[in-house]
Image (cartoon, grey):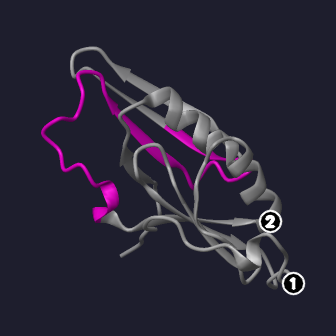
Amino acid sequence: MGLKYLHTMVRVKDLEASMAFYALLGLKETRRHDNEGGRFSLIFMAPEGQEDCPIELTHNWDGDDGLPSDSRHFGHLAYAVDDIYATCQLLMDNGVTINRPPRDGHMAFVRSPDNISIELLQAGDALPAREPWASMENTGTW
């Protein structure tokens, strides 16, 4: 039996805020399906050149009040980044809390506007420890 990765789906409450968050990580909209009858939108976003590895943002137009409030039931999304310090600085400069700072120059965790846990991993070898990251404490959960 063959198996092919298709996408990871997450429900989002504020579509614009979520798309802006994933755009900060470098993802771009690759396709979109708006369903008038079902009153929902599916927006697929992926890194440039990796359109076959998207995240599917599912937005129910009338809200998701009946769903669990913590979206962590699936785990987390993970992305490799060229410079973990620069990525975390960009996110922080744009109001994103760095829940688990990259103290080791290798791994960090942040949360999307919909409480989705995002793991950021330094591509290749870990970078040398650098301040302010090396002495930063964890914030919240990740």
Residue 138 found in image quarter: bottom right
For the residues labelled 1 and 2, the Cα–Cα distance comes to 10 Å
Indicate the position of residue 3 as horizontal and vertical percent values.
Answer: 42, 70
Residue on which disc 2 sits = 85
Residue on which disc 1 sits = 128
Indicate the position of residue 115 as horizontal and vertical percent values.
Answer: 40, 52
Residue 110 found in image quarter: bottom right
**Neighbour tally class for label 2: few under 14, some 14-19, many 20 plus, Cα within 10 Å:** many
63 in relation to 86, above or below: above
**Neighbour tally class for label 1: few under 14, some 14-19, many 20 plus, Cα within 10 Å:** few
* Residue 57 highlighted magenta (yes or no): yes
The residue depicted at 24 percent of the width and 49 percent of the height is 69
The residue depicted at 50 percent of the width and 37 percent of the height is 18
What secondary structure is found at the residue carrying circle 2?
helix
Image quadrant occupied by the N terminus: bottom left
Q: Which residues are magenta?
A: 44-73
Q: Nearer the viewer, residue 134 or 120?
A: 134
* Residue 54 highlighted magenta (yes or no): yes
The residue depicted at 46 percent of the width and 68 percent of the height is 142
Task: Using residue 71 as the reference point, say whether residue 105 is left or right of it.
Answer: right
Q: Earlier in the sequence, mark 1 or mark 2?
A: 2
Return the residue found at the far left.
66
Residue 52 circle label: none
What secondary structure is found at the residue carrying circle 1?
loop
Task: Using residue 83 as the reference point, say whether residue 26 is left or right of it.
Answer: left
Residue 126 found in image quarter: bottom right
Q: Amino acid at mark 1?
A: Pro
Q: Amino acid at mark 2?
A: Tyr
83 in relation to 92, above or below: below
Indicate the position of residue 36 as horizontal and vertical percent values.
Answer: 28, 14
